[in-house]
Image (spheres, rainbow, N blue to C red):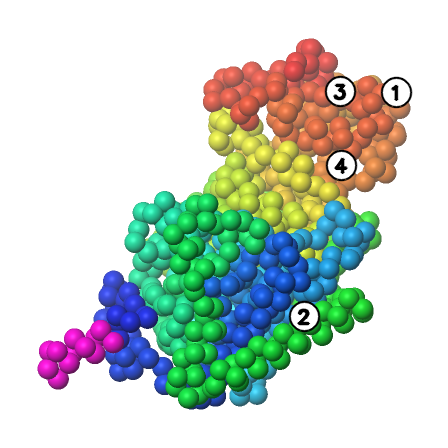
């Protein structure tokens, strides 16, 4: 070839309606693979007449739905896809191509723009269901619950062209842009984990991951602007979070609400943040749907071949403003002058097919008329018959589990016979032949072995209680996923779930080697991220209801880095979307003189979120309690998120101990009454670590007239149980004691839920003074404050506010 011919070929390949970034990659084999695929075809697909007509049909479906809704529901928000209708043939092609390459399931996530169109035309949501949401006839049943239609998820089984079936899901999501991304990845990982052959550590690129695909549809402004995107991209190749590659589609409207690209990012392309993964990017003109389907075919090929992320930057426009009632010409007058002159992508493509002799203008118009007539018929039927109910969320994997009120699901026995506990302790103390543990870890393993040989009364600490809870569940066959910063060792060096050989660093996980056929045990040190990892683990819990899924904060103070996940998913998903989760948040909490950033998991914020038995909030004080609590979370069919205030100094506190006998009897106790030696004149009600300060002070002060009551579960907490607590202490003073300041901790929660006692002045609070930050930075001041509130609790000093 001459130089002129080479240049012409390269221009045809890279300088028409597709532009590609891939030379920033480091692997020459990958770059060669991409180059050969693209240049051989000049980035142009060879399509049959049937395939071209299929593209036209998909564009017609996309356009007619938007046109119909615009006419029938004037002024109603729907966040139309108009201007980016090529997304529908893109998804159609993606599903078919993924199925052709052996894929079985796709989980999608996207924001509101074009979501209704995707629900109907990509996932197969019925017109009847969509129109019923617009008609909004179920006013009374939806009061205080539910969500807007462009947040709703859906799942369906789609028949592929070759006759096979593909399961499709679109995750429910809030308006907080991109926060659904980690949820999608977590759901996909759970589906993959369910089918993978598990031997030791999971492989990030196990071939089996090719069967389930995450697809995330982004907006250009959000992809560049939302920090959660970077957090999720960073998970892509990590052992505990890899999903075998994600197909990212950026629907690039070239504007974010009213913000121009030059004000929205510091980079030329919205996709530039993804260069950290060396991922290829296909920039494609959405007005050339054939280029769009070629780009998605390449993207799926790449993902399946290399199990890495890939991006499609779908350049398009937004026909209206941010919503259909917004006027975009206020801020983008020239852009919208051009947009108003444009023909819809369907019309442009129909004209192209007419010129090619593939389909006449009359045939294209007939497609439009037929589709509009069907929409009209379906709307009339909906108005006459109402909505058809879809499959319950409590089907399939979730058929054994339930939500609803706490009182409707009885407690379950969680005790484990001592012989079984001893047997498991022996296994937890063993390492493979030739494995050399760290000297201190070796002593810990030896202490476990000795505990197994004792008479059952020997005390043990929190780490043993945790391990035995996990071991008994795994022995029952339940899977466990545990993730968080420094989770394997534990922030405070109490867990040591994964051991490192002192000579060569090789890892060994005793909990993963209890017996053949045990439950799967995965524990991961997460990246230094809260929102991304918490969202991922929440997503994992949605598709693994039988498992114990734990996310642990390094300190509870840092959990608010994932506050959006807590607010928009964990605490409210059941109410909004009828979606349950059994995720466990473990949040180290307690005032120990470490300052305002290492003292508080913001217990008060979780309690403020409590309503309708939506979550559980617990503050256990003994190893036996955490043992029974973990087991209850799995064995009880009631699936609600569990928020646990976990200890720091109590991990090795001489009084915070239990014995095997405590695990072999009883169950989790929501409230523990520590009665006095004689008739009580004062009752101290508390929760958590402060209990140990109070019992120590009671002994020191010789106050055998003081009863101490621990609230191990702060929510759900029934009025009946509260009344039963004080019943035996008629006439005694009731004092609520907490380490936290008055405006924090559990005081306001207790006060609101116990009005008949508080209102009569019978319950007096003792706490630190109101404060804008949780704790003092001075260790001496901390000790002074702690002693003061203990003295106040026993009536030796005046309470202060």
For discs 1 and 2, the disc positioned in front in the rendered view: 2
Alpha carbon separation for disc pair 1 and 3 = 14 Å
Question: How far, Cα to Cα, is label 4 from label 1?
Answer: 20 Å
* Distance in Å between CA atoms under marks 2 and 3: 58 Å
Q: How far apart are marks 3 and 4 (CA)?
A: 20 Å
Q: Nearer the viewer, residue 195 or 760?
A: 760
- Nearer to us of marks 4 and 1 is 1
SS for dot 1: loop
As rendered, which of 25 and 20 lies closer to the eye? 20
User: Vertically, is 730 above or below 625?
Assistant: above
318 or 756, which lies in front?
318
Rendered residue at 57%/21% (across/down): 771
**Mark in the foreground, 1 or 3:** 3
| Residue at the spot of label 3 | 764
**Is any part of residue 412 visible from this angle?**
no
Q: Which of marks 1 and 3 is nearer the N terminus?
A: 1
Q: Residue at x 72, y 17 (%)?
A: 794
Classify 146 as above or below 350.
above
Residue carrying label 1: 731
What residue is at 55 percent from the left and 60 percent from the top? 80
Q: Main secondary structure of the magenta part?
A: helix
In magenta, the rendered stretch is 1-12
Local secondary structure at mark 2 = helix
Mark 3, Cα crowd under 10 Å, few <14 / some 14-19 / many 20+, is some
Indicate the position of residue 747 as horizontal and vertical percent values: 70, 28
Q: Is residue 789 left or right of residue 293?
A: right
User: Which numbered disc flags the more N-terminal residue, 4 or 2?
Assistant: 2
Give the residue pinned by disc 4.
672
Q: What element carries label 4?
A: strand
Task: Point out the tag, 2 or 3, that comes first from the N-terminus.
Answer: 2
Horizontal side of 694 relative to 358 (left or right) equals right
């Amino acid at each position: 070839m001459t130089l002129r011919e080479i240049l012409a070929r390269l221009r045809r390949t890279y300088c028409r309606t597709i532009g590609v970034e891939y030379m920033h990659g480091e692997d020459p084999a990958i770059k060669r693979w991409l180059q050969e695929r693209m240049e051989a075809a000049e980035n142009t697909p060879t399509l049959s007449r049937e395939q071209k007509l299929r593209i036209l049909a998909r564009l017609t479906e996309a356009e007619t739905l938007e046109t119909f809704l615009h006419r029938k529901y004037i002024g109603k928000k729907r966040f139309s896809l108009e201007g980016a209708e090529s997304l529908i043939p893109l998804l159609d092609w993606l599903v078919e191509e993924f199925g052709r390459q052996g894929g079985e399931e796709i989980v999608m996530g996207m924001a509101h723009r074009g979501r209704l169109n995707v629900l109907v035309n990509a996932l197969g949501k019925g017109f009847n269901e969509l129109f019923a949401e617009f008609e909004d006839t179920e006013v009374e049943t939806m009061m205080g619950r539910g969500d807007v239609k462009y947040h709703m998820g859906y799942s369906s089984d789609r028949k592929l062209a070759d006759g096979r079936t593909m399961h499709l899901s679109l995750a429910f999501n809030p308006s907080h842009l991109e926060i659904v991304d980690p949820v999608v990845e977590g759901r996909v990982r759970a589906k993959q984990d369910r089918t993978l052959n598990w031997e030791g550590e999971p492989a990030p690129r196990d071939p089996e991951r090719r069967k389930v695909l995450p697809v995330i549809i982004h907006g250009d402004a959000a992809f560049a602007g939302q920090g959660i995107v970077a957090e999720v991209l960073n998970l892509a190749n990590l052992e505990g979070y890899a999903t075998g590659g994600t197909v990212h589609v950026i629907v690039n409207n070239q504007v974010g609400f009213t913000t121009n690209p030059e004000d929205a990012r510091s980079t030329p392309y919205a996709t530039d943040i993804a260069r950290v993964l060396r991922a290829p990017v296909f920039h494609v003109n959405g007005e050339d749907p054939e280029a769009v389907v070629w780009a998605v075919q390449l993207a799926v090929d790449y993902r399946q071949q290399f199990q890495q992320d890939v991006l499609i930057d779908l350049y398009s426009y937004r026909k209206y403003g941010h919503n259909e009632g917004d006027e975009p010409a206020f801020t983008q007058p020239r852009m919208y002058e051009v947009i108003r002159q444009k023909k819809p992508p369907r019309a442009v493509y129909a004209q192209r097919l007419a010129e090619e002799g593939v389909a006449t203008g009359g045939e294209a118009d007939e497609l439009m008329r037929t589709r509009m007539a069907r929409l009209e018929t379906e709307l009339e039927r909906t108005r006459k018959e109402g909505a058809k109910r879809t499959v319950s969320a409590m089907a399939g994997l979730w058929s054994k589990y339930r939500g609803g009120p706490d009182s409707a699901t009885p407690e379950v026995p969680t005790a484990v016979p001592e012989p079984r506990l001893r047997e498991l302790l022996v296994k937890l103390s063993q390492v493979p032949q030739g494995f050399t543990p760290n000297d201190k870890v070796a002593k810990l393993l030896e202490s476990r072995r000795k505990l197994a040989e004792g008479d059952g009364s020997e005390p043990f600490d929190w780490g043993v209680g945790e391990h035995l809870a996990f071991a008994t569940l795994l022995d029952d066959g339940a899977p466990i996923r545990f993730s968080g910063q420094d989770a394997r060792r534990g922030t405070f060096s109490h867990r040591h779930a994964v051991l490192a050989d002192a000579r060569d660093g090789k890892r060994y996980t005793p909990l993963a080697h209890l017996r053949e056929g045990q439950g799967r045990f995965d524990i991961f040190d997460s990246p230094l991220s809260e929102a991304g990892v918490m969202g991922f683990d929440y997503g994992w819990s949605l598709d693994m209801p039988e498992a114990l899924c734990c996310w642990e904060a390094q300190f509870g103070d840092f959990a608010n880095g994932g506050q959006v996940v807590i607010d928009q998913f964990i605490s409210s998903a059941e109410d909004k979307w009828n979606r349950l989760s059994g995720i466990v948040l473990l949040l180290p909490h307690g005032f120990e003189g470490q300052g305002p950033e290492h003292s508080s998991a913001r217990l008060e914020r979780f309690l403020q979120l409590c309503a309708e038995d939506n979550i559980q909030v617990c503050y256990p004080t003994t190893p036996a309690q955490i043992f029974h609590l973990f087991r209850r979370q799995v064995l009880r069919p009631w699936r609600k998120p569990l928020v646990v205030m976990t200890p720091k100094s109590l991990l090795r506190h001489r009084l915070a101990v239990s014995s095997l006998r405590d695990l072999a009897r009883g169950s989790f106790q929501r409230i523990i009454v520590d009665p006095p030696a004689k008739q009580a004149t004062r009752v101290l009600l508390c929760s958590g670590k402060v209990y140990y300060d109070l019992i120590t002070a009671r002994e020191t002060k010789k106050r055998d007239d003081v009863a101490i009551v621990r609230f191990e579960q702060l929510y759900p907490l029934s009025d009946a149980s509260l009344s039963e607590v004080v019943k035996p202490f008629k006439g005694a003073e009731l004092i609520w004691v907490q380490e936290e300041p008055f405006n924090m901790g559990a005081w306001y929660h207790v006060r609101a839920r116990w009005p008949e006692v508080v209102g009569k002045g019978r319950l007096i609070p003792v706490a630190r003074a109101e404060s804008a930050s949780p704790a003092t930075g001075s260790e001496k001041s901390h000790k002074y404050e702690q002693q003061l509130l203990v003295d106040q609790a026993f009536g030796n000093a005046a309470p202060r506010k």
